[in-house]
Amino acid sequence: MVYKSAPIRILLLITATVLALTANAQTNASTEAKINALIKKMTLEEKVHMIHASSSFTSGGVPRLGIPELVTSDGPHAVRREHGRGWSGLNNVYDSGTYLPTGVCLAATWNPKLGYAFGAVLGSEANFRGKDVILGPGINIIRSPLNGRNFEYQSEDPYLISKMTVGYIKGVQDQGISACVKHYAANNIETKRNTVNVNMSERALREIYLPGFKAAVTEGNVNTLMGSYNKFRGQWATQNYYLVTQILKKEWGFKGAVISDWGAVHNTLEAFWNGCDLEMGTDLGMLPNPNYSKFFMGDTVVTLIRNGKLDEKILDDKVRRILYVMYKTNMIDGVRKKGEYNTKAHQQTALKIAEEGIVLLKNDNRILPLSSSIKSIAVIGFNAERNQAMGGGSSQAKAFYEVTPLQGLKSIGGNKINITYNQGYRIERGATADNTLITQAADAASKADVAIVVGGWTHGYNYNVWSDNAYDAEDTDKPDMYMPFGQDELIKAVIKANPKTIVVLIGGGPIDMTRWVNNAPAILQAWYPGMEGGNALAKIIFGQVNPSGKLPMTFPKTLEDAPAEKIGMKSKDLQQLYYTDDIYVGYRYFDTYKVEPQFAFGHGLSYTTFEYSNLTVQGSKKKVTVTFNIKNSGSVTGAEVAQVYVKQEKSTLPRPEKELKSFEKIMLQPGEQKTIILTLNADAFQYYNDIKNEWVLEPGVFDILVGGSSKAIKLTGKVTL
C-alpha cells in the first residue's frame, strides 16, 4: 500500500519511532532486571571475583550463575597471538590472522567508512577466536614526534580522531564484540609512563585531549574504556576521580566498564572509590605461583567491606557495569556471532586501507607513477624485506602472511621489470653508516633506471629485545628524529648515483629529512601498512592506484620545530610533565606561530589535480552550511579530502589560527565535478573558556577556510554568528 498523504506518512513515522523507543525501553528494563537479579544472588566473594583478572587476559566469572569470564585481547589492529592462562605465547595454535595497517595509517585515509570496515574485521576475527573485548582503538593525541606509540594513536587533531574512532568502535561492536577505547587520558609519551605526572590546563584537556574519548562514549557508545598508566594532576589516571567519576561517568554518562591498563592500579581505596571497575595485570604474587585474589581489588576489598570500611553498593555498581557489557554483547542469555577468520574479504579490507592510507609527500617532475618504459629498478633498504607484524609491543600480531615492499614490487611489476635488491643498512641500535653496504647500494642504483630506497623507523619485536631495534614500540620513545642506522648517508649516496630515486618511509610518524629532502624527487609515507602493504605500495608506485592519503599529523623539519619540544616544558627525570604548549598542538602551533613544517597537516599529493570553486556559507549559531564545488581537473580518477577549517577573527581568549571542523573524501572521475555540502554545528565555533569553566560561543565573525591541507587553503568565506 502506498500512502500519498504527507500527514499520514508523518503519523506512520512518528508511530514507528515511538514503538521502537518503547521496545528499546522495555528491552533495557528487562536487562536491568536480569542484572539486578543476578547481583542479588551473588556472594560478596563472587562479586569481587568479577572485578579483577582471573588470568593474564581474563576476568573472573561466576559459573554457578552462568556468568562467564570476560576474555580480552590486544590489539588495536589485529587480534593478538594466543596466550594461555599465563603470559607465555602458545605454540602450534591457530592464531595467525588478518594484520591490518596500524592506527596512524587508518587515520591517514581520512575515511570514516574505512574506520568502520577496520573495526568490523577486528570484531569478526575476535568472535571467531572466542574473545569478548578487543583492546582498541588507541586514540591518545600525537603530541610529540618521539612517542613510540604514535603508530597506534592516529592523529594530532581531536576532530579527525573522533570521526575515525566512532567508525572503528561501531564496526567492532556491530559484530557483537566490545571495543575498549584507550588510554584514558594524557598518555602521550612512553618513557617513564608508569611514574610521570601530567599537568595541563583545563582548556587543553577539554579542547585537545578529551574530545576523542567523549565521541567514543557519546557517539560511538563504546562498551569499555581503558585507563592509562600515568598520573594526571597528581592522581593515577586509572583511579582519578576527576577523569573517571566526574567527567566520564557523570558528565558523559558512560554506562560501560572502566578497565585498568595492565598494572595501572596502585591503591585499593582510590581504585574502588574513584571509578575503576576491573583491575587487570597487577601480577601481585604471580610468580612462581599465580594468585589472582591478591590484586588490589581482590581479597582486600572483601575484608574492607566486611569491616564496614567500603560500601558494597559501589561494588555492585562495578559488577552491574561488567554485566551490562556482557548482556549487550550476548555473553549471557544470547547467541554470539560465529565470526570469520582471515577471509579474502578481510584481506581486501587490509589492502584498501593501505591503498588509501599511504601518503605521497613529494612528486617532483611527476616521477610517479613509474612509466611503462622503466626496465630496471634497484630496491634498497632493510625495511624493503622486513616483516613488521610482530613488532610494537602489545599490538604485536601473527600475520597469516605479510607482503613486504620488495615482494609487492616484484609481484606487481616483476614480470616486465628487472628488480634487484640491496640491504643498504643494518638494523641494530646505534649502528652507523656501513660504507660497504652503501657502496653496493649506490652501484646497484647507478645501473638501474630507477632506485627505490625503503627505510625509516622500525618496530621492536618483543619486550626482551626492544633495546636493539625499537623506535616504534610500546614502553619506549625515540631518542631523537634523526634517521637511524646511517640511512641519511645511504639515501644521499643513492640519489647521487641515480637522481631518479624514490624514498619510501616506513614508520609511525615524522623523521628528519633535512639532509636529503630537497634532492629526493619523490617521497612516500607508507606507515606500517599491514599484511597487504607491499601490494598497496607497489600499486601506487606503478600507477594502478592513485594515492589519496593525507597526513593526520604535521611533519616538522626538525625536532626543535615541534611544539612539545620547543615550548612544552619537561623535567629531565620526567617525574613532572608540563604541557605548556597548551592548545597549540600540531598544526595549531605551526600555523599560529608561522613555523614552516616539512609537510603540513592534511597534506597528500595525487596523480591528478583538483579545483575548488563556488564557496557559499549560510547559517546561524545552531547550524552553518558550507557548500562548494570540487572538480577533477586532471586525467586520472582520484580522491580528494576536502577539509574545512574555522577561524574566529576576534575572541576573548587567544585561539589557534585555524581548527579542523569538517572534512569529506570524494572520488572523482577525470573532468567530473561534485557539489559538497557540509554542516557545522554550534560546537564547531565554540572554545573552552577556562576562566568561566564552560564552553562558549562568542558572537562575531568567523572565517571558513576550505582546502586540501592546513596550508593549502583554496576558498575562504565568512559567517557572522
Image: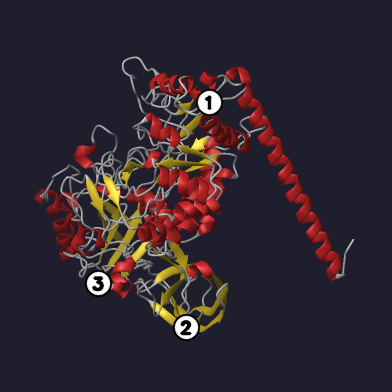
Q: Is residue 644 left or right of residue 335?
A: left
The quarter of the picture where residue 428 lies is top left
Q: Work out whether residue 93 or residue 627 is closer to the camera in this orientation and state it.
A: 627
Secondary structure state at the residue bearing disc 3: loop
Above or below residue 541? Residue 576 is: above
Q: Which residue is mark 3?
A: 595
Disc 2 marks a residue whose amino acid type is Gly
Q: Residues within 10 Å of mark 1 (few under 14, many from 20)?
A: many
Q: Residues within 10 Å of mark 2 (few under 14, many from 20)?
A: some
Label disc, if present, on residue 717 of the rendered structure: 2
Q: Position of residue 308 (x, y in %)?
A: 47, 23
Above or below residue 76? Residue 166 is: below
The reply to whether the C-beta atoms of the residues labelled 1 and 3 are less than 8 Å apart is: no
Secondary structure state at the residue bearing disc 2: strand
Q: Which residue is mark 1?
A: 69
Disc 1 marks a residue whose amino acid type is Glu
